Amino acid sequence: MSFMRSNRSSRVIPKRLLAILFASAVVPSLALAQADIRAMTRPVEPDTQQMKKERVETQAVEGAAEGTVEPAGQPGGIVPSGGVELYQRMGAALPPAPPEKPYGGPVDEAYGAYQRGLFVTALDRALTRAGAGDAAAQTLVAEMMTKGQGIKRDAKAAAFWYQKAAEGGDPAAMFQYSMLLMTGRDVPRDKKKADEFMRKAAEAGNSSAQFNWAQIVVSDNPGEKGLHMALPFYEKSAAQGVADAQYAVAQLYVSLKDMPAEKKSKAREWLERAAKAGFDTAQLDMGVWLVNGVGGERDYDKGFEWMRVAAHRGNVVAQNKLAHLYIEALGTRPNPVEAAKWYVLSRRAGLQDPALEDFYLGINEETQKQAIEAANRFRRGTTLVSSQPGQSIQ
């Protein structure tokens, strides 16, 4: 088993980032945990590479897929992870809010105007406070200049205000400024300073910074030592609802040596929260864990359902494994057309599987035809690759 997403502004959560992170440190432990009774294995995606010694960041292709522009002066178009939209990716229901206490402090008129969509008013009031050194107001000005709210977009001016607010101790600004320093976008690229502000933002409680700082710690400290050092930051970020962090916590709880039994017992719970938040790699692994009995009892029916969810979301590995589940009738009735359909889809995406290829060539031409038609319907609206019955999938 080895081990991916959301776009927030210009920041991109890297698909397969955790897969690369844990490829060498976690997989062996998982293999031991499952012994030799696994009902299915987890193939590594064809473009997965071992983690580089440099910092862990996403690849240019992910940014291109999301429509982002490659940062100038940044090798390989690297874009760092930027957290997630928490309320869209929350893995569990929030507890009831506590009763509001009467507030007798000063009213933030700038932010109030911003929330009501009165951007010109908000900017006017925020600029006055920003010029006087108010870090929160400086962050608001930077955000509005970045988005072009109440003023023409001005990335360089926004970078200036992010820097001022970061130096003034605002956690959100420290995170944003760190990302600018990582990419060299609108400010000189400075890894050392970027790490410093990312660490400070993480320690100040910013959930996205906590996840990113954990990634940096792992990258700079290979092996289990780095994973242990990063775990507290993953845990804090996970507790605030970052699905990528929840996924990381689940993998580390089940895989790291000397992990307390109490934490190991919660591994599947964290993975399920990430899966329910819509994180497709977590959905894939939830299916694999349930089928194989990792982190708890086997449940073929639920494992099949999670695998099906991930496959329908376009996860290529899940499509591949779903084909196996249909063939082996694990959690579902055997269905050669569905099995061949999901194999066709995963094979077109580049994931080879000799066993499924043999299965496909062994079914009759009519079943192959039905499978290809079903695959084409699933991929409607995209460029479809046709295949003649009796031939391997191209």
Image (cartoon, grey):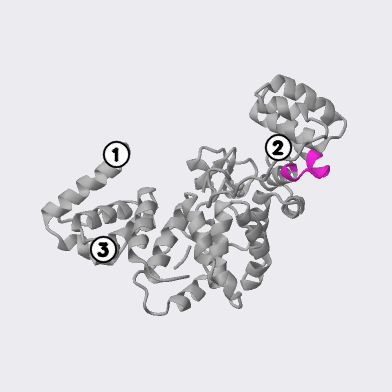
106 vs 70, left or right, is right
Decide whether residue 211 is among the magenta residues: no
| Magenta span: chief secondary structure | helix
- Horizontal and vertical percent for residue 121? 73, 20
Q: Nearer the viewer, residue 61 or 309?
A: 309
Kind of residue at disc 1: Arg
- Horizontal and vertical percent for residue 127? 80, 26
Name the residue that disc number 3 marks.
Answer: 356
Can see residue 135? Answer: yes
Magenta stretch: give its range: 164-173
Q: Give me the C-alpha separation between circle 2 and circle 3.
A: 49 Å
Residue displayed at 26% across by 67% down: 355
Residue 239 placement: quadrant: bottom right
Q: Are marks 1 and 3 in contact (CB under 8 Å)?
A: no
Decide whether residue 167 is among the magenta residues: yes
Q: Give me the C-alpha separation between circle 2 and circle 1.
A: 41 Å
